[in-house]
Amino acid sequence: MESSDIKEEKYAVLLVEDDEVDQMAFKLAVKKDGLPYDYTVAGTVAEAANQLKTKAFDVVLVDYKLGDGTAFDVFDILGDIPRIFTTGAGDQEVAIKAMKAGAYDYLVKDMSRNYLKVLPGVIKNAINHKRNLDRLKEYHSSLEKLVKERTEQLANEKELLSVTLASMSDGVIAVDIDKKIILFNRVVETLSGSAWHDAMGKNIDEVLKIVNEGSGEPSENIIDVVLKTGQLKVGTSQDCLVGQGGELHPVSVSAAPIGEVGGNVVGVVVVLRDVTREREIEQMKKDFISSVSHELRTPLTSIMAYTDAILSTPALAEQARREYLLIIEEESKRLATLIGSILEISKIESGKMQMLWQDVDVSAVAMRVFSALTAVANKGSIHLGADVPDEPVIIKGDENKMESIISNLVNNALKFTPANGTVNLSVRPESAAGGLYICVTDSGMGIPKEALPKIFDRFYRVYRQGKKIEGTGLGLAIVKEFVSMHGGRVEVESEEGKGSKFTIILPLSVEVKSAVGGAAL
Ligand code: ADP
């Protein structure tokens, strides 16, 4: 089969031989045996060089001694063409040298020219060997290319994974079957206080301590559960991660098995989410429900008691009756305000709150609030002042919302200012700064620094030790929302024990009708 292959194909053979008898013997052998050679004969190194320039050869037969050099000179210019070395008897040493110089084989030219009988086989093998080598080279280089591509791909994937993990807002830790940490991202570093390089390779139980927020007892080890069951496991809503300094971070923990293709669990990946804010909101909502129930019940109890007193005492003196009715009226108003706030916030939450755009005279609104709350200020022995322009200060806005904003701020100022304190309301259009400034300052109890960023949150109330102050934590949330609906912003400055200053800055689409500078009242 192989020999028929070689016969069907013609090989370009270059014979480099200076001996004319040997040349003739080769030609005769080709002719006699019908060898499939398209051969060329070169008698010298120079001739061989010429032939190599003009034609591509599959194999070269080179005699050792040539007129202008040796076979080694020809070898030097052959590139990767397979070569067979021929030499006279007794030159075996040179033959070995030729093999070392890259000859595929060597043939000893014996007197009876037996070597010509083996020549076709050697040529065939030399060519096949070269072809196999070429294929191997090709395979090798495509393998090399593949390895390079895969390595690059892996490096890219690794890079992508580490960038993704680093930029994730959740903490991710992966452990192997022995619970040794094999992956640890930046969020976990921040939460646990353990550096990545310290944590890698450690047992996860040394680094990740999860306790129950209420009892402080260690929570169930969900990594052990996952390793045992091979199922995803989620922690409890009470889980807290213990930081290096012993501080607790509310977290939501979930753990999932890392599985092999065959289904064996080879590790666990743990995802931690900082739920501090969610827990706070949860707590605030709980507090809100309890404070709202309380706030609703107090005036209601009083209304019921006084109504009952009026109804069950027909002979009640007119003055007492009037007094009771006034109390009922006041408590009803309180209830109405409270329910109004709840309705407003729920309207805001559902996105149903609309602006009724109109020209609003902020001076007039401010004076209306001032007048309405003077009685409250007097009752609490607080000096309520107003620094409001006499002239109308007109803005495009919603009058009811504007009144609600100012009234909420002044009400708060009065609520958190003890007797003999002062509360001041001012309205200042500042054309140069491009804003209308509404300020409510008080000399009251102030707001703790750490509470300042949260006071505009819904349901948030500052805990005042030993003091029972009515409220729902909704007033400032409504103020903030209404101000932003007017395209403005609200700022607060406060010092505990000294007082607070709330400033509303509205964009000056304000029309000031005349000069500013109302007298302080
Ligand atoms: P609340 O119904 O409790 O008054 P708010 O949303 O109006 O709710 O206010 C949130 C918290 O901000 C209050 O609980 C209070 O502690 C604080 N606060 C608001 N205004 C003042 C102020 N003028 N002085 C001191 N604390 C204030």
Image (cartoon, rainbow, N blue to C red):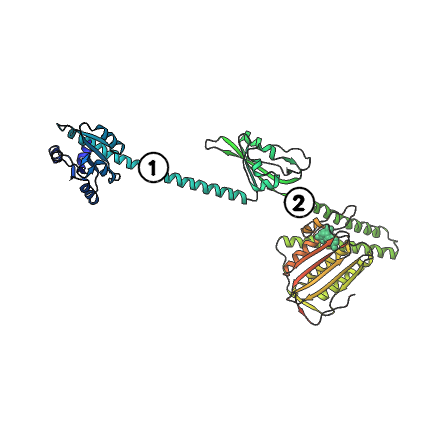
Q: Nearer the viewer, mark 1 or mark 2?
A: 1
- Residue labelled with disc 2: 280
Which of the two residues, 185 or 60, is positioned nearer the viewer here? 60
- Return the residue nearer the eye: 425 or 129: 129
Amino acid under disc 1? His
On the image, the x and y values in percent for residue 368 come to 75, 64
Look at 15% across and 28% down and name the residue there: 110
The quarter in which the C terminus is drawn is bottom right
Amino acid at pointer 2:
Glu
- Dot 2 falls on a residue whose secondary structure is helix
Residue beneath the point at 15% across and 34% down? 35
Q: CA distance from mark 1 to mark 2?
A: 63 Å
Where's residue 151, x and y in %? 42, 39
Res. 140 mark: 1
Counting from the top left corner in percent of width and height, residue 215 is at: 69, 35
Residue 514 is drawn in which quadrant? bottom right
The answer to whether 467 appears left or right of 340 in the picture is right
Q: Are marks 1 and 2 in contact (CB under 8 Å)?
A: no
Mark 1 or mark 2, earlier in chain: 1
Front position in the image: 19 or 126: 19
Q: Is residue 517 visible?
A: yes
> Which corner quadrant holds the N terminus?
top left
> For residue 398, which quarter of the picture?
bottom right
Which residue: 71% across, 71% down? Answer: 515
Query: How crowded is the residue under tag 1: few (<14 C-alpha within 10 Å), some, or many (20+)?
Result: few
Which of 350 and 15 lies nearest the eye of the viewer? 15
Q: Left or right: where does residue 302 sit relative to residue 282? A: right
**Crowding near pointer 2: few (<14 within 10 Å), some, many (20+)?**
few
Disc 1 secondary structure class? helix
